[in-house]
Structures are given as structure tokens and as C-alpha cells.
Image (cartoon, rainbow, N blue to C red):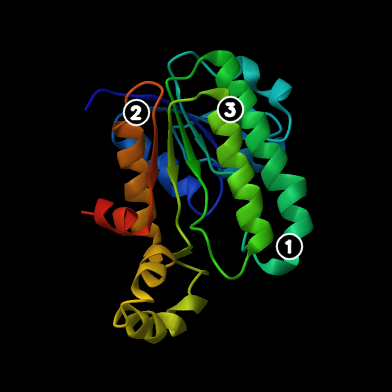
């Protein structure tokens, strides 16, 4: 697999820190955007770009033509109570990322959206859909991943819902929703992101990776 030049926003977070370290271990060149206060949390060996994920002007010069741009900035532990934060952080960050990526002429844009439609988390879904729309308007070659909830350390409460998921999959009318809004592990999510980085769609196309395909990415 040829080495990629990868620019990551959100590389100090729950998913991003694992992804950055694994990409580096696989021989890719990784640069990570970080606020000054968080730069020590960037995995060793990753090149740090100091800037503000909400302000494209603060990092645009460090995004290169041909990069794979992975956008992972988002409100931690999203819940319906955080609707204002989604619009204050998540939405401007994806607009800044798309602006910087389009200006640089990146080869591939990877975005973690969310599974939809769903009966809850409407504000979160709306913001992520706006992010997907911004990518489309910019004409970026893109891979969009749509998990529902990523299980891992500190993120395990939905495990209690697994019997309900199993029951729902037995009812034909409910099965599609249960699959679309299913749970994935942090290992599956990182593996799916690595696969996205290493297997870009044809130029100008946009690929969507849903929960069943995220699960299939893990070895």
C-alpha cells in the first residue's frame, strides 16, 4: 500500500488518537491539527500543526495538494442536550475543514457523520447532514462514514441495549433500522477509517460507509 500524506483534525480525541497512531504505524505521513494546550496529546511521531479547527485561516497553509484530509472534530459524548454545542463546534469545524481542503486541492476527504434517519438526536443528525452537504457543494472526492455509537473505553452504556437490537433484527420490518443504527466498536471504527484512507473512491465520487460496512472493515 503506497504511503499517504494524511491531515487529521481531532487527532487528540477518542477515535482520532488511535487512528493517527495506527496510520503512522502503517507507514503513512500524518499531520495533526491541535490547539496549543492539546499538542502534548498528539501521538508520538505525528507532526503537529497548531491552529483552531473552527478557523480555516489558522491551518489552511498546512493542508497540501494531494493530501487525504480526515475530519474528526466533534462534541464529545453527544446527546440531545448538546444541540447548541453541535452548532457552535461541529458545524463551523466542518465548514472550516471543507474550505481548507478545497483551497488546497486535497485528493480525498474523509468525514465521520452519523447514521440517519433516527428517532432521536435530531439536532446532531441535522448538523452532520449539513456537513455532508458542504462536502458535496465543494465537489470533494469523499468517503463519509455513518456510525451510530462507537463502543470503547468510557463509551459502553449502550451495551445494555444489545438484547433489544437482537430482538429488533428478528422482526423483518425493524431489521433495516436495527442494522443502520447498530453499535460498532472502536476497533471496527478505526479499521474502517484506515480502509477509507487507503482506498479512496474514484475522483469526484462520494462513498458512504454505513454501520454494516464499518463492522466488516475490522480484520
What is the distance, in whole Å, between disc 3 and disc 1 at their CAs? Answer: 27 Å
Please state the total of marks drawn on the protein image: 3
Label placed on residue 20 = none
Label placed on residue 137 = 3
Along the line of sight, which residue is nearer the eye, 93 or 144?
144
Q: Nearer the viewer, mark 2 or mark 1?
A: 1
Query: Where is residue 173 drawn, in percent x and y?
Result: 36, 76
Query: Where is residue 83 drawn, in percent x and y?
Result: 74, 59
Q: Which residue is mark 1?
A: 82
Q: Which residue is mark 2?
A: 28
Among numbered discs 3 and 1, the one appearing first in the sequence: 1
Determine the residue positioned at 54% across, 66% down: 118
Along the line of sight, which residue is nearer the eye, 52 or 142?
142
Question: How many C-alpha atoms fall within 10 Å of the one at disc 3: few (<14), some, or many (≥20)?
Answer: few
Examine the rendering and report whether any part of residue 49 can be seen. Answer: no
Q: Is residue 74 above or below residue 170?
A: above
Question: How many C-alpha atoms fall within 10 Å of the one at disc 2: few (<14), some, or many (≥20)?
Answer: many
Amino acid at each position: 500500500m503506497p504511503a499517504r500524506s494524511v491531515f487529521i483534525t481531532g487527532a487528540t480525541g477518542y477515535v482520532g488518537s488511535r487512528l493517527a497512531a495506527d496510520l503512522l504505524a502503517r507507514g503513512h505521513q500524518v499531520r495533526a491539527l491541535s490547539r496549543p494546550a492539546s499538542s502534548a496529546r498528539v501521538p508520538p511521531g505525528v507532526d503537529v500543526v497548531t491552529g483552531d479547527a473552527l478557523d480555516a485561516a489558522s491551518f489552511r497553509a498546512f493542508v497540501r495538494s494531494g493530501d487525504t484530509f480526515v475530519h474528526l472534530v466533534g462534541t464529545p459524548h453527544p446527546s440531545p442536550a448538546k444541540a447548541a454545542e453541535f452548532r457552535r463546534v461541529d458545524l463551523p469545524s466542518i465548514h472550516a475543514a471543507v474550505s481548507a481542503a478545497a483551497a488546497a486541492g486535497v485528493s480525498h476527504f474523509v468525514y465521520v457523520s452519523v447514521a440517519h434517519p433516527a428517532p432521536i438526536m435530531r439536532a446532531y443528525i441535522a448538523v452532520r447532514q449539513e456537513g455532508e452537504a458542504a462536502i458535496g457543494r465543494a465537489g470533494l472526492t469523499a468517503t463519509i462514514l455513518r456510525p451510530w455509537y462507537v463502543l470503547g473505553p468510557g463509551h459502553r452504556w449502550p451495551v445494555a441495549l444489545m438484547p433489544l437490537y437482537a430482538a429488533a433484527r428478528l422482526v423483518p420490518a425493524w431489521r433495516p433500522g436495527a442494522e443502520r443504527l447498530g453499535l460498532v466498536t472502536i476497533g471496527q471504527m478505526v479499521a474502517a477509517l484506515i480502509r477509507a484512507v487507503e482506498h479512496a473512491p474514484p475522483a469526484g465520487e462520494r462513498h458512504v460507509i454505513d454501520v454494516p460496512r464499518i463492522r466488516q472493515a475490522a480484520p
